[in-house]
Amino acid sequence: MTTQTQTLGKAPAQPSRTHDYLYDKLYSLSSERDHARATFQAHTSTNRVKRVPIYPTMFSELRHHPRFEIKLDTTDPVPRFVQRAWRGYADQHREAMVRYTTFNYDPSVSIPPKVYENTEVSGRERYRFFRRPIIPFLQQVPPEVLLATARQDPLAGPEQMQVERPPTPPIRHMQTQTDYRDSEAQTDPYTPEYVVRPGSAPELLTLATLSYGRGLPAGLAEVEMIERARAKRAWEATLPPLNDTSQLEKRKKMMDEMETREWALREQEIEKLQEARLEVLKQLLIKREENHQELNIKRLDKVWSRKQKEKEQQVKKIRNEHIRTIRKLVAKQKRVEGKLQRRQIVKEYNNPDSQTYAPLTRIGVFMDRGSEQYVVKSRHLATYQGLLELEASLPDFVTQPRIKAPKPATVTKAGFTKRRYRQERELTEMHEAIKAEKLRAQQVAKPLRFLQKIEKPVPRPPTPAIEVPDQEEEERELAVIFLQQVIRGRAVQNMMFEGKEKRMELIQELRSTHALQEEEQKQKVREMQATLALQRQRRLHEHKESLVDEALSSAECNSLGDMLDFLSKELIRLQEERRIHAFSMLAERQRRIREAEESGRRQVEERRRREEDEIFKQVIKVHQSSVDTYLEDVILGAVDATADAQARAEVQEMAEQINDVAYDLEKSRTQLDSEEIVADLVHCFLLPEVQKSTVREKIKRQQRRFLLAAHKEINKDGEQIMSMHSAPTPTAGTSQQSTPEDEDESKKPQTV
């Protein structure tokens, strides 16, 4: 058995572990879909596949006796206390609540705060506390750049294109760019510490709730709020004191009037806020209608363009069909006589305008397509002067090569022929001898060895003969053929004339560029130079006008930009003031609503507390009566037990005395005395005991009747109290939950 040596290398480090998405707090997933994907990858990972050795064949190398088997590890490496759900549900729910409260005012919805456990603000968690501000009113406006026109003529020669390099300035300005903006590095204004003099109440402290960015610097709304607060403090100073009972009605009346005025003022502010919202809603509706209109226009344009394309395709198809039909008709006209002509290859190759040299493009051959990309356009190759310059720049060894072909040395230094050349000469002589032998063998006539059969040629078929046509018929046919030729020639003339009319502009251009005389060409050159001069002057004039317009537009833009900046800032400030005022009004309204709800809730709680106190008193009373009854029973039982013990002791003493007397009497008694004693015992013990049991049963019946009446009375009162204070049964519209105190009271056993 052979041995194998295997080198085990260190496994490469993994970028992330398999179950990091569950127990690593820094591992974040964007959505539930990614969480499901990571879970699937973790469950289908190859780390769970293990090799389990088969001990009987652990050292075998045979295929039908494997050393190990592949098994899937069923143990879960993740502990049970680790949550397997996606951790982003809370953040997703919080973001949904933030969006809901942003677009819908609902005071009952409270957004839970974001809690960071063991947050290291100055350590590794520092990146969580930096965020670039989102400024909605700053938009990226592309700059209006006016590029300067070219100072040089693009059609000028290479000599005119050379311009002197501008001189280097003596001073160079360097600029730097930081990673932070000024708005990010700006801090709140500094507020120094202050000490209030005892006994004084500065008015400035009433504005302690305002801070920078939240009411400061003060605007129109803040000034109005301060004035209202001053007026309210002055009005509070005029209120009658509370210790004067005669002025309570006046104080109440003044407070009602002030509250009415405040409600009226709040209603006005709410109306203003509603008007602003309505205006915003109108603008949004107008914008939506404009967007819908724009979408409709785009959709119509798209449909129109599609219809136009379909129309162009249909027209193109019709034209191609027309051209194809005309071509078929021309081909049919060529075969009117019914004669087929073979292809004359020699004539086609001799004719330069045939299909061989110039095939038609409709067949699919494009001879000159892409040929321009290989054309070298250079002044040295296109002009005679350039060729002269190119030849002058080349060295002599290029135009006058001095390389001579070397002659092979067939003879060695000793005068002998080299082996390779000697073999070549021998092979050449052998080839010439074989060739001469073949020629000599061909010249000798070989005798016939077998008889040869001479086959007769196939007889030619008889020459067909045609009937001689009539002279008139032949003349008529010739006339018809001539008429067809005339019509065909006229059609070709018309086609040539139509083609010439269609390409008249191209023909004129060719005539104007190639067929002009020298004077006309010079005239064209002078006209071109005059046109170029006019164009140059027009460009210079446009450049000057653009410079003037640029200066004027820059001045106008600066003034307009400052004005629009000021107006936008004022508009933003006014909107912020209105928004803050609306928030304060909504907060005040919410506070009053909550106070009213709290007062109603407090009244309900007090009434409930009184009812529970009364129930508790009644229950305690019942419990006290039960305790009294229990104590009475205990005392009566103790008295009965004591009396029984005492009676037993007395009975034993009396029994001992009676036994002594009886023993004395037994010694001296007779039969008659014994019968008298038995009669006395029966009369004194048995009959009184029967009477006592009868009397006890009668008393017990009487007491049971009174006890049942007391039980009925107590149960009746308890049921009435419980029915009065029990919770009403829930209906379809309302639902009421039981408190823990009610559940505890219901769980307590009722003792009577």
Image (cartoon, rainbow, N blue to C red):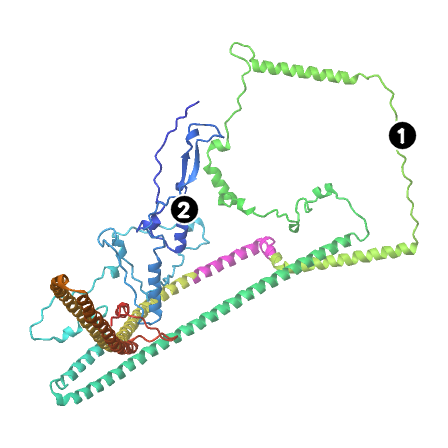
Q: Main secondary structure of the magenta part?
A: helix
Q: Residue at x 91, y 41 (%)?
A: 463
Confirm whether residue 234 shows in the render: yes
Q: Give the image location of residue 62, x and y in percent.
A: 48, 28
Pick the residue in front: 696 or 206.
696
Regarding mark 1 in the picture, which secondary structure is present there?
Answer: loop
Q: The C terminus lies in which quarter of the figure?
A: bottom left
Query: Quick one: label 2, few (<14), some, or many (20+) residues within 10 Å?
Result: some
Q: Can you give x and y, in whole percent of width and height, for residue 99 in the image?
A: 35, 66
Label 1: which residue?
456
Q: Is residue 107 above or below residue 473?
A: below
- Can residue 244 be found in the magenta stretch? no
Question: Residue 344, how many percent across, how many down?
Answer: 75, 43
215 or 156, which is in the foreground? 215
Compared with 586, 151 (above or below) is: above
Viewport quadrant of the N terminus: top left
Numbered marks: total: 2
Say whether residue 63 is left or right of residue 321: left
First in sequence: mark 1 or mark 2?
2
Stretch in magenta: 509-538
Q: Is residue 209 visible?
A: no
Question: Which of the numbered marks, if any, corresponds to residue 544?
Answer: none
Query: Where is residue 689 shown, x and y percent of the image?
Result: 21, 71
- Disc 2 residue type (three-letter): His
Give the CA separation, mark 1 to mark 2.
Answer: 94 Å
Tell me if mark 1 has few (under 14), some (14-19) or many (20+) residues whose alpha carbon lies within 10 angstroms of its own: few
Q: Amino acid at mark 1?
A: Lys
| Magenta-colored stretch includes residue 528 | yes
In-image side of 408 versus 60 (left or right): right
Instruction: Specify the label residue 43 is tagged with.
Output: 2
| 485 vs 526, nearest the viewer | 485
